[in-house]
Image (cartoon, rainbow, N blue to C red):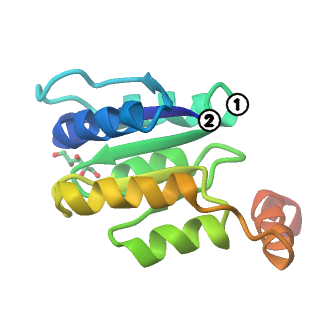
């Protein structure tokens, strides 16, 4: 799978570990930065990963900042993006099964590396259930027409 990854300085260390895991699992990694722990602005990187996923340049995305909040706010502004901020395995699994999340967002200052790497595996391995959930995610994309 082609996976786009991005972080700010607060997520950089975890992003590097996520990248190594993805490569070990045989995925193609598109790294949109950042590239060090020097302080940067998270929207710059969130936008790049969201655009890569929205345009189908990447199949899935993984975004990491300090809390995950900023990155999820940025990514969810893009049509077709369903970015899920998760900090444990159950929500990560449900984000795929029920929400067909295409970007996993994590807080590098919130969770430990081992849990984060397990979440990445679950995020990539869990299929979308479809059915009634298909209708619901379509309603998310069409909300502008309904208000
Ligand atoms: C950076 O200090 C921090 O604000 C950022 O990583 C993120 O947590 C924002 O939501």
| Residue at the image point whose x is 25% and y is 58% from the top | 67
Q: Is residue 77 above or below residue 106?
A: above
- Where is residue 135? Give x, y as percent: 86, 71
Place of residue 51 in the rendered image (x, y in percent of width and height, measured from the top left): 59, 30
In this figure, which residue is indicated by the disc labeled 1?
A: 56
Tell me how far mark 1 sits from mark 2, CA to CA.
5 Å
Task: Give the number of the disc on residue 134.
Answer: none
In which quadrant is the N terminus drawn? top right
**Left or right of residue 14, residue 73 in this image:** right
Secondary structure category for the residue under label 2: helix
Vertical side of 119 occupied by 146: above or below: below
Q: Residue at x 67, y 61 (%)?
A: 127
Left or right, 15 with reference to 126: left
Q: Quadrant of residue 89?
A: bottom left
Left or right, 73 with reference to 100: left
Question: Closest to the observer: 65 or 62?
Answer: 62
Give the class, few, some or many, for how many residues have Cα within 10 Å of label 1's Cα (few <14, many ≥20): few
> Is there CB contact under 8 Å for labels 1 and 2?
yes
Query: Would you identify the image quadrant in which residue 18 lies?
Result: top left
Q: Nearer the viewer, residue 34 or 41?
A: 34
Tell me where residue 96 appears, x and y as whole percent.
60, 64
Residue at the spot x=43%, y=38% of the render? 25
Residue 126 appears in view: yes
Looking at the picture, how far across and down is residue 105, in whole percent?
41, 53
The residue under the point 19% across, 63% down is: 110
Q: Is residue 51 left or right of residue 146?
A: left
Q: Quadrant of the C terminus?
A: bottom right
Callout 1 secondary element: loop
Residue 53: image tag: 2
Vertical order, 120 against 31 (above or below): below
Q: Is residue 7 visible?
A: no
Count up the numbered dots: 2
């Amino acid at each position: 799978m082609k996976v786009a990854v991005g972080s700010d300085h607060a997520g950089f260390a975890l992003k590097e570990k996520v990248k190594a895991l993805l490569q070990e699992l045989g995925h193609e990694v598109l790294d949109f930065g950042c590239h060090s722990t020097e302080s940067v602005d998270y929207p710059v990187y969130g936008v790049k990963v969201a655009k890569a996923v929205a345009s189908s340049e990447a199949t899935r995305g993984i975004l990491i900042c300090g809390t995950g909040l900023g990155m999820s706010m940025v990514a969810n502004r893009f049509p077709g993006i369903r970015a899920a901020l998760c900090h444990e395995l159950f929500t990560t699994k449900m984000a795929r099964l029920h929400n067909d999340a295409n970007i996993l967002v994590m807080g590098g200052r919130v969770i430990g590396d081992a849990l984060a790497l397990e979440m990445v595996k679950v995020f990539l391995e869990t299929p979308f259930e479809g059915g009634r959930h298909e209708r619901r995610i379509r309603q998310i994309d069409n909300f502008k027409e309904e208000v």
